[in-house]
Image (spheres, grey):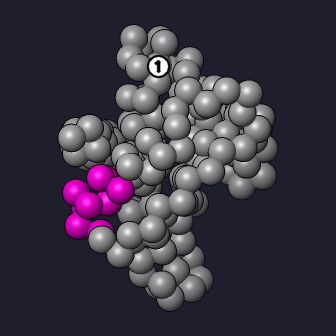
Amino acid sequence: MAVHVQSQDLSSRPVRVGQVRALAERMLEHLGLPDAELSVLLCSDAVIHELNRDFRKKDRPTDVLAFAMQEGEGGGLHPDLLGDVVISLETARRQAKSGARAIVEEVTILLAHGLLHLLGYDHQDDAEEARMNLMVEELRLAASR
C-alpha cells in the first residue's frame, strides 16, 4: 500500500505527517485494501477554502474534502488508486477543542470520513449518515490499535 502525506501552508503541525500515514495505513489494512494508493494533504483553512470554492462551488473553508479517483470517466482504470483526502488542521483544531478531544483523534475521524467518501460512502439521508458514522467509528478504532 502507498500512502502519501504532505502538508501545505501550515504555521504549526500539531499532527505529524508520519503519524497520519500510519493511521491511514491501519485503516486501509482494516478495509482489506493492501494495494491501495492514497494521498493526504494536511493544510490551512485558506488552502481548503480555495479547493472547496473551486471544486464544490462552496465559498468557505471546510474540515475535510475527498477527491475520488474511482468516479467519473476513467475511474476504473487503476482500481487501487483511491484518490486524495484534504484535511484542514485549523478547522480540525477548533473542532477538537469544541468536542473536548485531542487533535489527533479529530484528524483520525476526518481521515476516516474522507477515506469512506473515496470508497463511495455518502451521507445524503439519515440511513446513509448512520451507516457512514458507524464505519467512521470502526476505522477510528482500527487506526488507534
Depth check: 142 or 59 in front? 142
Q: Which residue is at 39% across, 62% downward?
A: 120
Q: Which amino acid does label 1 sit on?
A: Ala
Q: Is residue 127 left or right of residue 3?
A: left
Q: Which residue is drawn at 44% across and 42% down?
A: 19
**Residue 59 percent coordinates (x, y):** 77, 37
Dominant SS type (magenta): helix
Q: Going by the image, does 89 lie left or right of 131?
A: right
Residue 47 locus on image (x, y percent): 75, 41
In the figure, residue 141 lies in which quadrant?
top left
Viewer-nearest residue: 125 or 144: 144
Binning the other alpha carbons within 10 Å of mark 1 as few (below 14), some (14 to 19) or many (20 upward) gives: some
Boundaries of the magenta span: 25-33
| Location of residue 93 with respect to 68 vertically, above or below | above
Q: Tell me: 59 left or right of 126.
A: right
Q: Where is residue 18 in the image (x, y as percent from the top left)?
A: 48, 46
